[in-house]
Structure formats: structure tokens, C-alpha cells
Amino acid sequence: MNRAVAAFRELQRRDRVFPFLQEAAPSPGLDTRHGPILYVEGISRSFDGFQALDDLTLYVDDGELRCIIGPNGAGKTTLMDVITGKTTPDSGHAWFGSRLNLLRMNEHAIAQAGIGRKFQKPTVFENLSVFENLELAMHADRGLRRSLFWRLDGEGRDRLDEVLALIGLEARRRTLAGSLSHGQKQWLEIGSLLMQNPRLLLVDEPVAGMTGQETEQTAELLVSLAGRHSVVVVEHDMEFVRSIARTVTVLHQGSVLAEGTMDQVQADPRVREVYLGEEET
Amino acid sequence: MGLRRLHRALLRPGVLNLQGSRAGPEVTGPAFPANASANRSSVWFARTGTFMHKSNWLTGLLLGLLLGAPGATLAQSAEERAEAIAEGGQQASDAAADGLAGETGEVVGRLATAEWQEVRDAIEALAEVGDADALPVLRALQDGRLYYDEADRVLVEDAADQSLRDAITGDDVEREGLQLSRPPLTNPIRRSLRPVIGQLQIFADDVQLRRAAAEELADRPQAAILPRLQDALEQETDGEVSRLLRIAVARLQLDDEDAGIRLDAVETIGAIRSSRLKGSLERFLRTDADGAYTEPDAAVRDAARAAISAIEQREQLSRLLSDLVYGLSMGSVLLLAALGLAIIFGLMRVINMAHGELLMIGAYTTFVVQNLFVLHAPELFNFYLVAAVPAAFLVTGAVGIVMERGVIRHLYARPLETLLATWGISLILMQTARTIFGAQNVRIVSPEWFSGSVQLMQGVSLSTSRVGVILFAFFVVGLVWFLMTRTRLGLEVRAVMQNREMAAAMGVSANRVDMWTFGAGAGVAGLGGVALSQIVNVGPELGQAYIVDSFMVVVLGGVGNILGSVTSALGLGVFSKFLEPVTGAVLAKILLFVAIIIFIQWRPQGIFALKGRSAED
Amino acid sequence: MAQARINRIAGLHGPAGWLLFLLAVAAVLVLMPVLNRVVSPESIFHVPNWMLTLTGRFLCLALVALALDLIWGYTGILSLGHGAFFALGGYVMGMHLTRNSYADGGVPNFIQFLGVSEWPWFWVPFQWFWFTALMILLVPGVLAFLFGFFAFRSRVRGVYFAIITQALTFGMMLLFFRTETGVGGDTGLTNFQTLLGFSVRDADTRLALYLVSALAVIGGYLACRYIVTSKLGRVLTAIRDAESRVRFTGYNPLRYKLFVWTLSAMLCGVAGALYVPQTGVINPGEMAPAQSIEMAVWVALGGRGTLVGALAGAGIVNGMKSYVTAVHPDLWLFFLGALFIIVTLFLPRGVVGLFQRVRGEGGRS
């Protein structure tokens, strides 16, 4: 892990800028001239009478780092599912930029358009090595023919090595992902997300099961990603949210309860009642 | 290559009963002719014995069942005796042991001859006398059970126990030391026998016999017996018999020279609406070369027209109804075949490819129970099915539990491996059945009350066994419902299937529940086997025909949903029955598969989707 | 750890592996024909003609195993319907052979039974070999493509997919059993005379068929190997392990699955087409569900996801089948059934996995 810490120090150096962190991969068709990169308007979704999302409206600006908090069942994960195409809402709109209608796109098309997602439970390709996991995630043509005749070029190899160093898994590049520890899998998934280099990152509970030091590293990484990329973080850990948050959205019973800075949100009496109140007792 | 056999089996009406085929070297177990000699069967038995050393538990299990009956090596002859008992039941009614009256007795005595002309004359004379008591003698003649000895005594052999009795006096006769000969039975004699038996039978006391005779007469009435028919019609008390007799009479009267009688006859037919007379009525509407009607009387023609349209209406209705009923019956067969799978696959998500073989074991258990009854309690033979039901449930359930404990338990997290392993089990079970019972189909005789047919309405009749299967299907569904909702096991099963960890935390042993659920599912499959044994051939490959169908039923109905399986099985049965006349049985089946695949496109969760978050994953 | 390694490509990575491969190729392509033709029939090393043909048939089945390994071992899609694709390839070839066995203008009995004295329209183009060759690929390919498209699109997976493929082959079998389908009904197609002008019973033709089968297996192996070691192969493995994750990474699994599924069906079609002239008969029994499941055990026994294992498994099971059915016909099903159970319970990585373990442990000690 010390290697990873060192890598982070490296990352913080002003004179040493990682090219892959500088610019997100281009997303053809993405239009963010109006400001927001993500428009979620009036989304409702119910499961067998249970209203998971209720007329939820949310905008995320290009380059923003947004935290979403809320008690269990507030609809955080369902919201992510709607954005990434896993779940179709009963009503409402979801646009990526002002031109791409997310509700009309498949999961893979959404991912190709530039939305990356890290799941709550780390999912890596267990029977592929760490290196191959990152190679698959690397931003490239996902077509059939390109995959069949794919050769990793020098530039790609450099990028891969950089990410490997960043997530501290250089020594285990040939290890099967399935035999990594839980924490290492988390890092590998974050690494995959970096290789994918999306315009918008959705990160679901990134620090669950991480040590304090790792949590800190993750926080630094996410903060450094913001600006060039847009990042949406769903998290339970209030300390963590406080350490990275610029804007916080509080979800409650499937809709937005409050939005603002951490201090504003904490001062809101309704939030206190439904969420922070529970936290404190 | 059993391919021809396979193809024949495919074309059998009703349920497509696939005998299963295996290209490449055909593997058959020791095949023995149905009436194996004692010597032969001891060889067979010795071979089965050697199998017991090196082969598996099931051989031992089934063999143990057989050995439970000391005379089990007589299994083959037991089958024959079972048939004899069942036939004996039907014949009992005419085995009246009273002697014959004077004139009848005298004519019957003339049958003791080797000259076929004399036999024919005697038959005609009996028709004139018209005494129904002569029926057993004629029937014995028809079946080749009639003998005469050197003293020209006419002797009748009993169908069931082969004992002899004197046809005229009715006394029992000792077979020992008699020189028996048979009267000749040539084709002309057979031909003249049939109407005479029909004529005599129409006056019999037994309604069943009268009905059978009336059927025959309604189809092939002879002008000569018209007065006799009218007599019979006057005396008749049974509704169905008099309906048939009226058909016979009307049919003869259609040719009457008097237009009034013809008109009456046509109107009678119109009122009866019997479709078998439609052809005779159409004759009236035909025209000859000059365009003139063959029937001169216009009133008769109009009546014929009206009668035909009435008949056609009735035909349409009854065709619809019989398709529906027959489809339901096919559906309930499917349902019985699939219910066990609905539990094992639907609730436990275990892919049991040996499901068909569980059906087969159920059917063979019925066979063994039948033979045990024949050997030890022939007087209770009619009730062997009642005993077979619990026996099949227990035997198949036990086999299921052994399967679960031995193999499936180790494969719960790996569905595809389960599929392959259970297929292996199915091969072993199939070959075991072949080794024990032979590669040929075994004979299962339905008890008397289970053979015959039930008339639901005029023109719509269904064999009793099929009606029984429908009722039995309801019974089994009820049983499963009871098991799953009203017993402790059902509660635990539902708990474990919904949330294993939680159930375990509440003190439910998931391991044990798995075992009992699998056992119960297998037992229900065994019940399906009992039902199948009554309507299809029982052989080692019985199960192969139903495995694909059963999976289709469960997948279509929605996995994990027993009500869905019920609906889809009945639906599939009716649907394919209505499709069959249009496309033929084979194409209907193929279309059904295509329809199911398309349906799954549209609703991946089956007919009754389980709503809620769980279904979303 | 051991579990995770199950499906890695075994062997043939290093120079030693390639040497072994070349030796095997030489044995099949050179040694067998030499032993058949050059060595005198009295010699103990002589390979009689029947053994050559038997080996040729095994090679065809090995190609089927390769195709099944590609779809099951690597992509995790168990097909219980590959018998249908195999038989379709066989039927296409059988139709070509039958069509040209009636050069004098007559038609076989099963056509006459349909009440016509002319070849039905769909038989006509099969007189040309080029058309037949095309159809050997297209008929199984198109069927697989359509079936796969609908099944994969609605995300039918795992055992559900396996069951539907079983229904597919069952339905096809019923269809081909019908005399009205016009391809021979329950007896199928047989009594072949000539192939491309050569008598199919001739020893030279048989040798040629053997060599073509061998080349097909070698070519198929190299093609499959190229695919599974490419990035596409890694996507396939990824689909097998975590399909939805692949989707969120931006790959469209439908395309990948459809590609490898169709390819696999086409390989099967080729295998069937080469198999039929060597056995002299094709009938609907080849489409029986049991046949297709047996194919799965070849792959499982050899070791899934290894290609070599599939080849070995097909050889082992069919070799045993030939032997056991000849010596103890009653025992074969017990044997096969036990094989299914033993492989799934005790040999999840198959024979290849067993070898690896032995070698691995030997290296450590």
C-alpha cells in the first residue's frame, strides 16, 4: 500500500501531470455548451408499489464533483441504475449533455458515450489478470472486428503502466483478478474506471471496506479527477463526504430533499429530521 | 436404430410420446420375449444379480421391491394374468352358469361338428330362435373358446381361468382326459356371427351389452331384422340404447317406399341429430344426370335439408367441445409430468434432467404394484391403482432423496454442472430399468373401472382413463398446494427459497429442507408416472418424451410459480389440440416451441411474472 | 485460487507446446496415411482402412468439441443444441451426395412417396458443389444467428438458454422426422455413391476425406486459438464471468455472443458435412437431445476453456464408446452416466486440469 501512497504523492506534484488525467476521452455527440452534463428531470420509478424514485430532478454541471447522500431506500442506487440504463423509469427524462437521450440508449451505448460506473460491490473479471482487466477497460473502439485484431500499442501500454502504478498493483499485473483481496479489487475497479476515462463518473460507495488511509487516497483521487471529469459520488460515510464535497444532494424517499454545500445541507431542518437526526442518535 | 419405432411413436395421436433415439450403436439391455420360459427368466434373474454387485443402489432398490414378492420371477406371467383378470371382469356378466332352454339347447348342440356349413346353419337357427341365453356360446365361438368332446358335448372355456363347462347343462367339466376339438371358425362364419350376436344382445339384461349391440346395429342395420328392432325399441328402457335403436330403425325406413314413412324417418333423424346419418340424408338431395332429384317428394327433401343443417350445428359444437376436453386432458397429462419439475426446478432452481426418469420410475412402480396384486391378491386387483399412488410417491421420493444427497447437494451453486450430472443420472436410471425390466414396454392393464369411456354429451366421449387423469391432476395440484401452503415443510421451503441466510438464522436447516423438497418434488413426479402408466406405453425411455415438454411448461408458466405451471400446461394442451388438425401433430409441436421462444422474448418472466425487486435482477 | 484458474488456456504457450502441436499434426497428417498405405498389411503397425475412417470420424467430432468449447468453455453459454447444427451440415452434404447419386434422372423413393417424380425445388441447387459448400456454412449459420439474436437479445442465459437450445434440436428432429419435409424422413439420407465424381466407397476417397477432416480440425484449432487469445477472447471470458459489467464497460455483449455462437454453429456444420460421407448416412437421430448433451461431456471431460481438452475429451469419450459398445453394449449407458457424474463432481477442470495439477505438484516437490 505504501507504493500506492507514493503514487498519490506523485499525483499531487504540480510539475508532473498525468496525461490521461488531463483530458477525458472525447465523447462524440456530447454537448455541454449549456452547462450541465447530466439532466435528470421528473424521473419516477416504482417496484411493485414501492416508489423508489418519485419525480426526481437533478442537474450535474460539467466538471462538477457532486455527492449524493440519503438514508437507505432513498433511491440512490436506483438513480444510478436509471442513468446507466440498467433500469427504465416509469416516467421522466434523462439526458447526457443536451443531445444524448439516456433513456433511449443501452447500457453499453451509455458507457461508450462517456459515463463510467463503479459498483458498490466490486466487480472485476475474475478469470482475467489485472493487466487484462485494465486493457479491456481502456478507452478504444469496442467493435467486434477491432477486438479480434487488437494489438496494444506503446502509448496504450504506457497508460496502462501508469494506472497500474497509481492503483499500486504493478507487482500483481499477471495475477488473476479473482485472487486479489477485497481492497485490491476496489482499486482495480477504480483503475478500470480511469482506463475507461469517461466524461462522467458515477461512483457508488467507493470507500466501503477501505482503511482510513485508503479512504484518504480515494478522496484525493476523486478531487483530482473533478474539473476535467464530472464525478457523482454516492456515499454513506459522512466524514468522507465532508472531505470531498463541494455540492451535496440529499435524497429522501425517491426525490431531492435538499441541495447545497455541506454546511447548508446540515443546517436544513428537514435534513436533520430525516437523515442527520438519525445519524446522531 | 429404433428410428421407425420412434417415428411411429411420434405420429401417435394425442401426446407425442417420443421413445427416444440414439444414433450410433443402439444400446439395448437384455431383451426377453413377453412369455419367457422359467428357464429363461432364471438366466435373466442371475444377470440382474450380477448387476447388483457392481452397479448402483437403484438396482438394489427396485430389485428389493421385486424380491419382496417371492414369486417375482414370474413377473412376465403376472402381466398375462393381470390381463386375464381384467378381461375376466368384463366377461363375468355373460358367464351365466344356468343351463339352456329346450330349443336353444337343441340348436347349440348342433355346433358340435367339424363341418363349417353346419356351424353356419346352427348360427342362423339361433338367430331365429332369438334367445339371448345363447350369447355366451356364440361369443366363445367367436373367441375360439368353444370346444366339443368325443361325446359331442359342447363345452365353453372360461376366459379368465380356463375352466370348462357344458354349454347346455351349465355344469363344470373336468378337462383331464377329454378329447377336445374346436368347431371350424372360417371368415364367413365370423361374418355371420357378428350381426347375430348383435341381434341377440339387444335383448340382453345387461345395459352395457345392449348398448354395444345397439351401436353395432345403428351402424350396420339389416333390413331383415326391422320388425325385431321395432320390438326391441318398444321394450327398451335405457335412453341411449333406444336412441341408437331409433337411428337403426330410421336408417332402414329411409328406404321405405312410402313417402310418409320416409318423411317421418328424416324428421326423426333431424331430431336425434346423429352425425352418422348425415351421409344417408345427403343422398336425398342428390340429382341424377337430368338434374332431377333422386328423391321425388319435396317435403322429404326439405326435411332432409333442415335435418342436415341441424346435424352440422351439433357437429360443430361437439367438435369444439371435444377438442376442448381432449386438449384439457392432454394438458393435464403435461401438468402431471411437469408438476414435479415445477417444484424441483421452479422452487429450488435445480435443473433436474433426470426428471423424465422419475416419471418412469413412478410408472414402473405401478407395474410392480400391479404384479404384486396379481400374485398375492388377485381379488383386489381392481384397487391396485389406489395402492400404486402412495407406493410411487414413496419410491420415487426415496430415489430423489438419494439423488439429492449423493450428487446434487454438491452442485448447488453450479447450475450447468447440475444439468450434466443429472443427465448422467438419467442415463443410469434408464439403463437400470432396461436391465431389470427389459428393453421392451411392459404391459400395464388398467383396472376395469378405469377402462371404458365416459360420454360427456352426444358425440363427445372421453376414455375413463383420460377423465381419471384430469381428476388425478387436480388431486395432485391440490396435494402440492397443501404441501406448500399448509405444512411446516412448505413454510420452511418458502422461507429457504426466499432467503437462505435468513432462514438459516431462524433455525431452519436449509440443508434438510433441500433434501425434503427434492424428495417431495421427485415424489410428485412419481405420481405423474402413475398417471402416465395408464395412458402411454411404459418402457425405459418413457421419461425422455416428457423432459423437453416439462421444461417448456415450467419456463412458460414462470419459474417458481406453480399456478403458472398449471395454467401453462392446460393452455399448451388446449392450444396444441386446436392447432393439430390444421398443421398436423409434429408441426403443431414445432410451432408451439417457436411460440414459446417468442413469448419468452416478450415476457421473460413467464405468464405470471413475480413482481417486485427480486424479478429485476 | 485453483478455482479461479480453471479456465485459463492450457499448454501450447511455450515453444514446447508448439513442438507438441507440430508433432501431433505430423502424426495425423503424415504418420497415419503412411501407416495405412506404405506399411504392409501384415505388419503390426499397419493401419487398416476402417481405422483410418474411424479416426476421420473422430476428427470431425473433435471439431464439434472445439466449437462447443468456444461457446461454452470461453463464453459460458452451454448449448444443448449443437447436434442440430452438426446434423444440418450433414444434411446439406447428404443432399448433395444423394442428388448426385441419381445422375440418370431418377429420384429416390422418399421423394416418390411425396407424390412427385421430380426433385423438389429446394433440392435442385444441391447438384452444384459450390452451392453445397456455401450452404454447409450458411444453413447452420443463419439458423444459429436468428436463434441467437432472439435469445441473446432478451438476455436468456445459463440454464434457460441450455433448455431452449434443447427444445431447438428437439423441434428440428421432429421436423426432419416428417416424410413431408422431403429429406428422407426417419431413414434419413443414405446410399451415397459419388462425391465430386469419386466413389465414396473408394479407399482413395476415404483417405482424402480423412485428410480434409484432419486439416479442418487443425485449421479450426488454430482459428479458435487465435480468437481466444485475442482481445475478443478476453471479452468473451469477461462476458462469461460478469456480463453486466462488460456492458457497463461499453461492450455490446449481444454482438460478441452472436459472433462466437454463429461461428461455433458453422464449425459444427463443417464437421457434420465431413462426417456424413465417412459414415454413409445422416438421419434425424443425430438431432436427438441426447446426442447434443453427450457432446457437452466431451468438453467437460477434457477440460473446459482449454481447446486442447475439448479435442482430447472428444477422442477419449468416443474411443471408449466404440470399445464399450462393441464389447459390453449393456454397460455403455452406465459408463456414460457415471462419466457425467464423476466429471462434474470430481473433475471440474477435466483431464487437462488433472494434468496441470500433477505437473504443478511435481514441479513443487
Image (cartoon, coloured by chain):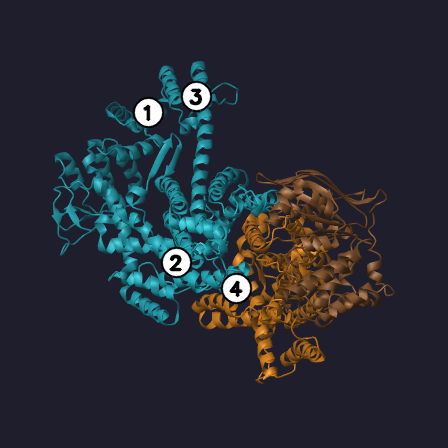
Give whichever of discs 3 and 2 has the lower sequence position: 3
Give whichever of discs 2 and 1 has the lower sequence position: 1
Q: Which of A92 and B403 is in front in this view?
A: A92
* Residue A9 located left or right of residue C361: right
Q: Distance between the residues labelled 4 and 2?
A: 19 Å
Q: What residue is disc 2 on?
A: B440
Q: What residue is disc 1 on?
A: B246
* Residue C51 located left or right of residue B275: right
> Which tint was used for chain C?
orange
Q: What residue is disc 3 on?
A: B307
State the SS at label 2.
loop
Residue at image point 27% right, 43% down: B142
Q: Where on the picture, by quarter, is residue B43?
A: bottom left
Q: Tell me if label 4 and label 2 are in contact, CB under 8 Å.
A: no
Are labels 2 and 1 assigned to the same chain? yes
Give the x, y percent position of residue A264.
Answer: 73, 44
Q: What residue is disc 4 on?
A: B24
Q: Tell me if label 4 and label 1 are in contact, CB under 8 Å.
A: no
Give whichever of discs 4 and 1 has the lower sequence position: 4
State the SS at label 4.
loop
Q: Distance between the residues labelled 4 and 3?
A: 59 Å
State the SS at label 1.
helix
Badge 3: chain ID: B
Give the x, y percent position of residue B312.
Answer: 46, 26
Give the x, y percent position of residue B456.
Answer: 37, 32
Q: How far apart are marks 3 and 2 (CA)?
A: 50 Å
Residue at image point 18% right, 36% down: B133
Amino acid type at image mark 2: Gln
Q: Which chain is brown?
A: A
- Mark 2 or 1: in front is 2
Give the x, y percent position of residue B321.
Answer: 44, 32
Q: Which of C2 and A209 is in front in this view?
A: A209
